Amino acid sequence: MKRHLIIYIALLLSIVGCRTDDYIVYMEDEDIGIKTEPTDVLGMYVLNEGNMGSNKCTLDYLDLSGETAHYLRNIYAERNPSEVKELGDVGNDAKIYGSRLWLVINCSNKVEVLRASDAVKIGKIDVPNCRYVTFHKGYAYVSSYVGPVSVSQDAPLGEVYKIDTLTLQTVAKVTVGYQPEEMAVIDDKLYVANSGGYMVPDYDHTVSVIDLKTFTEERKIDVAVNLHRCRADQYGQLWVSSRGDYYEEPSHLCWLQRDVNGQMHKMGRIDVPISDICIVGDSLYFIGVQFNYNTMKNERTLGIIDVTTHEVTNNRLTTAPEADAMIQPYGIIVNPNERDFYLMDAKNYVSSGDLLHFKKDGTFDYKVRTGDIPAHAVFLTKPKK
């Protein structure tokens, strides 16, 4: 009887082991077949969000350092085989600071810190419902919704975590507006775009101004409802996008400038739907998709704004049919040196997306399959001597 029991247990364990193996997603290395030219850009990390609740956030890498471009899918699992459940649930931001790659994993309530050179994990920081990260003078600043994922008028005010980039320890926190999103630093001031996304229909409409010397909120600037993107240009201007309310108020882009006393103020708005932006020199590249509940249609934009004139100079960044064929344009990143650019297509949100590469003049170059919901990308460049 005991012998039969032992055999049964061994058989059961072998079956369970086989089932576990079925869920492992191995790294894939695809030779794109496109020749590369030696530049300071070694490659590009792509963080795939993964549909919320699916625990399918993955990290890809576009290798541009060899003779031909290679796309490596799901590298985190291979580089960090001891990590349970890989990256986690919903990748929300990816940035490189110094020699480290920072990944904000929203619903897993953590920030992963990896070696930028090979994506090997260094450590993690626990931040509840974390959203975005930015850096200044040796510190990382992470926006946090604080409360759980839940639409409620009782949702708490958000916070920004101040983290030492060497020790990976949280050293301070400051309260900001409701459901804070992206942040930007200008002259020792941290500007935080508050969305109030959980407070629908009573969205937040402010940008919090944080004095980084005292790490306190100085004031709030009234900008627009449901703010999201927040980027600074080389002239000290602030560009903040509004998602709108999805009904009466459309998505648009606002620009802010400082007065003679250094106080930032809203100066104007540009009426184009904004999903993502990338600023290179005097050019603000934008991509936008907004569903209009009145017309029941998606409104799509893809163009360039001159940050000096605040005008759209190119509302047709590319005429390539491959761009028009994208199902759900989701993100954009522009090579700061060559001005070639990449578009990310989330497609149906539950299966593999696409990364599309275009030359500076908008000519389509190639397309490669990514993980689920490619949304955030960052270039890996040669270390400065």
Image (cartoon, helix red, strand yellow):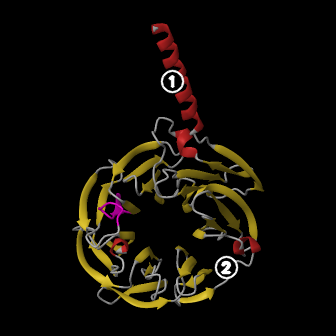
Q: Quadrant of residue 281?
A: bottom right
Q: Is residue 198 left or right of residue 58?
A: left
Residue displayed at 57% across by 54% down: 382
Let me know if residue 49 is in the magenta part.
no
Above or below residue 342? Residue 204 is below
Residue displayed at 28% across by 81% down: 220
Let me know if residue 138 is in the magenta part.
yes
Q: Quadrant of residue 352?
A: bottom right
Above or below residue 147? Residue 302 is below
Whole-percent x, y for residue 85 in the image: 47, 42
Residue displayed at 67% across by 79% down: 317
Q: Which residue is mark 1?
A: 13
Residue 325 or residue 343, whichever sits in front: 325
Q: Which residue is mark 2?
A: 317
Whole-percent x, y for residue 274 in the image: 52, 79
Badge 1: residue crowd in 10 Å (few <14, some 14–19, many ≥20): few
